[in-house]
Image (spheres, rainbow, N blue to C red):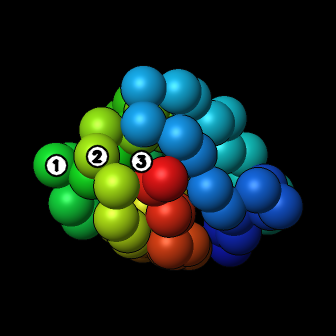
Amino acid sequence: PSVKIITPEKQVKVGETLQLETSQFGTGTVAWTSSTTAKATVGSSTGIVTGVSTGTTLVTATLSSGASTYTSAVTITVV
């Protein structure tokens, strides 16, 4: 299995949202996290990023398949 964030847009404005999408090989559940929630939050099951304040954050998609996990990450810039 594998997971990759495929959304071409990597920028979101403060107060607006951006839908991130993945391409995954194999079955399992994708969970989303943001490294700096003061800059942007992300819905853990939706991949919807909301800009909070200007700056950057690393958003990670983690595919859990059985006992294994696979990740893909992208830097999101909030303007």
Asked if marks 2 and 1 touch (Cβ < 8 Å), the reply is yes
Question: How many circles with numbers are drawn on the protein?
Answer: 3
Q: Is residue 39 depicted above or below 49 in this figure?
A: below
Mark 3 or 1: the one toward you: 1
Secondary element under disc 3, as helix, strand or loop, is: strand
Label ID, residue 32: 3
Type of amino acid under label 3: Trp
Where 27 sits versus 59, above or below? above
Q: Residues within 10 Å of mark 3 (few under 14, many from 20)?
A: many
Q: Residue at x 43, y 61 (%)?
A: 59
Amino acid bearing label 2: Ser
In the picture of the structure, the residue carrying the numbered disc 1 is 38
Residue 25 located left or right of residue 76:
right
Disc number for residue 74: none
* Relative to 61, residue 2 above or below: below
* Among the two numbered marks 3 and 1 on one chain, the one whose residue lies closer to the N terminus: 3
User: Against 46, is 33 above or below?
Assistant: below
Q: Earlier in the sequence, mark 2 or mark 1?
A: 1
Q: Earlier in the sequence, mark 2 or mark 3?
A: 3
Assess disc 2: are there few (<14), some (14-19) or many (≥20) residues with their C-alpha within 10 Å of its C-alpha.
some
Q: Which mark is residue 53?
A: 2
Q: Amino acid at mark 1?
A: Ala
